[in-house]
Amino acid sequence: MKIDQETLESYLKTGHKQLEILGKKCFDWEEATTFYREQVGDLHLFELTAWHLSSSDYIADTLRLIADNCQGNVLDFGGGIGTHSIAAALSPQVEKVTYCDINSRNLDFVNHRVSQIGLKNKVRCCSEVKDKEVFDTIICFDVLEHLLVPSKQLLLFKEMLSPQGKIIINWYFFKGFDQEFPFHIDDPDVVDDFFITLQKNFLEVFHPYHITSRCYRKMPS
């Protein structure tokens, strides 16, 4: 899709609000996968791009965190517009990156991005992760709050990780002060279960950046 500058700027300004409206109208936890795969369309692209542009310092520190900790075989789970996959792929200690997202528009966009900058051979784009594939690093940003049972995803990450592997994640279990994130889970029992699972299975790795993202390795046995 080709759009002019004026239209692009309009989409960037309104993407978040349009996504909020769509979420309030159409989102249902029982049909969450269908919502993200078939109904969100381009809205997530514009919403994420606008957020990245308006939060450049935060994003820069997130990319530094990735550069410090990513290595080997990397999974970017729910990779959005692909910025984190690209950052990982540019790290010399990273061998390959699997970018995974269920939104076909995101997949097309990231495929184009990595082709344009010559990373096609290092970044593989897919909508599902292969069974029993092992990763040395898993990154997952702004995804866990969109899952009905986020603790289950943590345990799946643990199974996917190599023995010395790390996960770099964040979460936002909050629907917003004005309910602008109707697709975020905020059930107290679900959130408690998430943190209990996290603390039982992973040990935090310190980093110096003032951001919400955290780095963990498997809890020593």
Image (cartoon, helix red, strand yellow):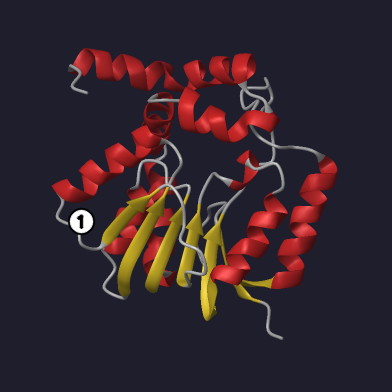
Up/down of 185 relative to 200, above or below: above
Residue 149 visible, this angle? yes
Q: Position of residue 189 (x, y in %)?
A: 85, 46
Can you say which quadrant of the picture contains the N terminus?
top left
- The answer to whether 119 appears left or right of 193 in the picture is left
The spot of residue 133 in percent (x, y) is 47, 69
- Hey, what amino acid is under mark 1? Lys
SS for callout 1 = loop
Relative to residue 176, is residue 156 depicted above or below? below
Q: Is residue 53 visible?
A: no
Q: Residue furthest right?
A: 189
- From the viewer's side, name the closer residue of 143 and 65: 143
Compared with 172, 7 (above or below) is above
Q: Whole-percent x and y of residue 10?
A: 32, 14
Q: Which residue is mark 1?
A: 120
Residue at 18%, 22% in the rendered image = 2
Q: Which residue is painted at 20% across and 62% down in the image?
A: 121
Residue at the bottom extreme, as displayed:
221
Query: Can you tell which quarter of the image residue 64 is in?
Result: bottom left
